[in-house]
Image (tube, grey):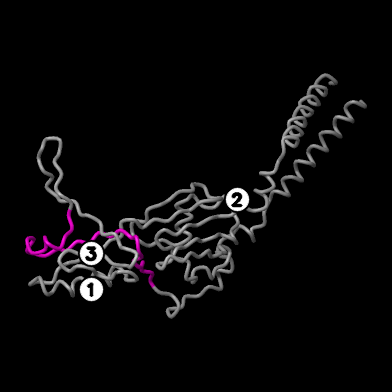
Amino acid sequence: MKVKHIISNEFRLIFYLFLLSGFISCGSTKTIAYLQDAENFKYNSELDSLYDARIKPKDLLTITVTTFDKEASLPFNLTMPLAATQTNSLTSQPVLQSYLVDNEGNIDFPVLGKIQVMGKTKTQLEDLLKQELKTYLKEEPLVNVRFVNYKISVLGEVGRPNTFTVVNEKVNILEALALAGDLTIFGKRENVKLIREHADGGKEIIIINLNDSELIRSPYFYLQQNDILYVEPNKAKARNSQVSTTTSLWISATGVLVSLATFIVTLAR
């Protein structure tokens, strides 16, 4: 009976220890939930506007000029030489080359020469090229500008850290985190770092608080090309990373004791 009493106390102690660790590991929703106080967030037409990406140095752009008379627009499309296929026949569709924006924010456009594009949106550049091409074309052309290398990177305490290509040239912070599999439970919601390089080469680190509903109106809510998001680990992750070999051995020893106690209880019955 004495043996059973001792074993019972040991089981009770182990149960309380595991229960206590469960309470400690449970985080408050105040540090986990995104966009808190969202019920106070109201639409404001003066503050809210559509985002449009602006061209920076080192961007890669594709620009197509289309007219009803295909021959007329040919000189204004930068195409690669037609490549021969395995059967030595030429491909029917030429491949467009990309324009690299130089450090001064210019591209070298066929016939027109150097054009300043830095700081312009794709729509503004399209309108500019239409205006410049009026001298050379009898009809108004259809001009289409697209970003080739619109990429963002997400790393740190997320499910799938990676670099992502944004096809529609528009992505906000929450969408970027969704692409990366969202924050892990160990990610600091109130201290996400946004690393941004500006057109003049200047660097900036911005602290983003995902808990704050005013993030929606932040000038940093929409990410620019080549932005980097870094999710810092919280204190719980730091504590977990500092678990020593001794602690691991202690946990293993506890498991052995539980197994031994179970064996003794079985024999004592």
Vertical order, 71 against 80 (above or below): below
Reply above or below: 83 against 11.
below
Residue 173 magenta:
no
Q: Residue at x 48, y 53 (%)?
A: 154
- Compare residues 140 and 56 and report the one nearer the observer: 56
Would you call the spot at circle 1 few (<14 residues within 10 Å), some (14-19), or many (20 or more)?
Answer: some
Mark sitting earlier along the chain (2/1): 1
Q: Which mark is residue 185?
A: 2
Q: Earlier in the sequence, mark 3 or mark 1?
A: 3
Real-space Cα separation, disc 2 to disc 1, in angstroms: 48 Å
Disc number placed over residue 128 in the picture, else none:
1
Q: Spatial distance from mark 3 to mark 2, Cα to Cα?
A: 49 Å
Percent x, y for residue 18? 75, 41
Along the viewing direction, whichever of 241 and 57 lies nearer the viewer: 57
Quadrant occupied by the C terminus: top right
Tally of numbered tags: 3
- Checking the image for residue 108, the label placed there is 3
Q: Nearer the viewer, mark 2 or mark 1?
A: 1
Q: Earlier in the sequence, mark 3 or mark 2?
A: 3
Secondary structure category for the residue under label 1: helix
Which residue does the image show at 57% across and 67% down from the upper left?
212
> Mark 3 or mark 1, which is nearer to you?
3
* Kind of residue sitting beneath label 2: Ile
Give the residues drawn in magenta, as a range. Answer: 50-79
